[in-house]
Image (tube, rainbow, N blue to C red):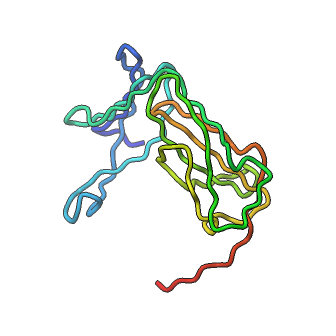
């Protein structure tokens, strides 16, 4: 981390600063802002201070963004596939149930493992709702496949994995001209 004019700041429930992590974003020339625009990007992994309620992104002009979440972490449980299924189909529907006692908005990421949970690859991000349909030709064939669902309220994060492995059949390779 290169300290700079920007910072990720963690606050408790009474707005006391718990931690400050200054950083320098990277310029992204001709990014989403259009030709000639200079957008800034960053990716920071920071330790979560106990008691964090609000995370603030601050810059030289003041507060740029704020994420506030309840004190309780949300929960999630994979419903399907949850072990023993065999997918020799074009798609698989991954479904889950979740709750948050604080009533915060929840967002979900889906991970896929073809090696019984040893390694994970993110296959869907920033979802809302309780299911997603995935094309099986984007998933590695495996008889030890599992899904992991991460849930976050913007601050607190939990996850759940398929209870057991399931099978994703091998599929013909796709061919395209670029």
Quarter where residue 76 is shown: top right
Q: Nearer the viewer, residue 97 or 71?
A: 97
| Quadrant (top left, top right, bottom left, bottom right) of the N terminus | top left
When the figure is inspected, residue 1 is found, relative to residue 156, above or below; the finding is below
Residue 51, position as x, y percentages in the image: 48, 19
Which residue in the rendered view is the most extreme toward the top? 14
Q: Residue at x 49, y 24 (%)?
A: 49
Which residue in the rendered view is the most extreme toward the bottom? 177
Residue 87, position as x, y percentages in the image: 72, 62
Residue 86, position as x, y percentages in the image: 77, 60
Q: Residue at x 62, y 55 (%)?
A: 93
Q: Residue at x 26, y 36 (%)?
A: 64
Q: Nearer the viewer, residue 59 or 97?
A: 97
Side (left or right) of 10 relative to 173: left
Quarter where residue 63 is shown: top left
Side (left or right) of 138 relative to 61: right
Q: Residue at x 46, y 26 (%)?
A: 103
């Amino acid at each position: 981390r290169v300290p700079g004019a920007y910072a990720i700041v963690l606050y408790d429930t009474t707005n006391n600063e718990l931690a400050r992590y200054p950083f320098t974003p990277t310029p992204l020339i001709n990014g989403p802002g259009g030709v000639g625009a200079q957008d800034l990007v960053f990716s920071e992994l920071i330790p979560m201070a106990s008691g964090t309620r609000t995370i603030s992104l601050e810059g030289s002009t003041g507060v740029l963004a704020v994420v506030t979440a309840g004190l309780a972490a949300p929960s999630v449980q994979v419903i399907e596939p949850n072990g023993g299924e065999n997918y020799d189909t074009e798609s698989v529907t991954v479904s889950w149930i979740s709750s948050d006692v604080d009533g915060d908005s929840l967002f979900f990421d889906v991970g896929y493992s073809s090696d019984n949970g040893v390694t994970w690859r993110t296959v869907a991000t920033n979802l809302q709702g309780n299911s997603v349909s995935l094309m099986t030709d984007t998933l590695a064939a495996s008889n030890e496949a599992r899904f992991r669902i991460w849930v976050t309220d913007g601050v607190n994060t939990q996850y759940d994995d398929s209870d057991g492995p399931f099978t994703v059949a091998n599929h013909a390779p796709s061919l395209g001209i670029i």
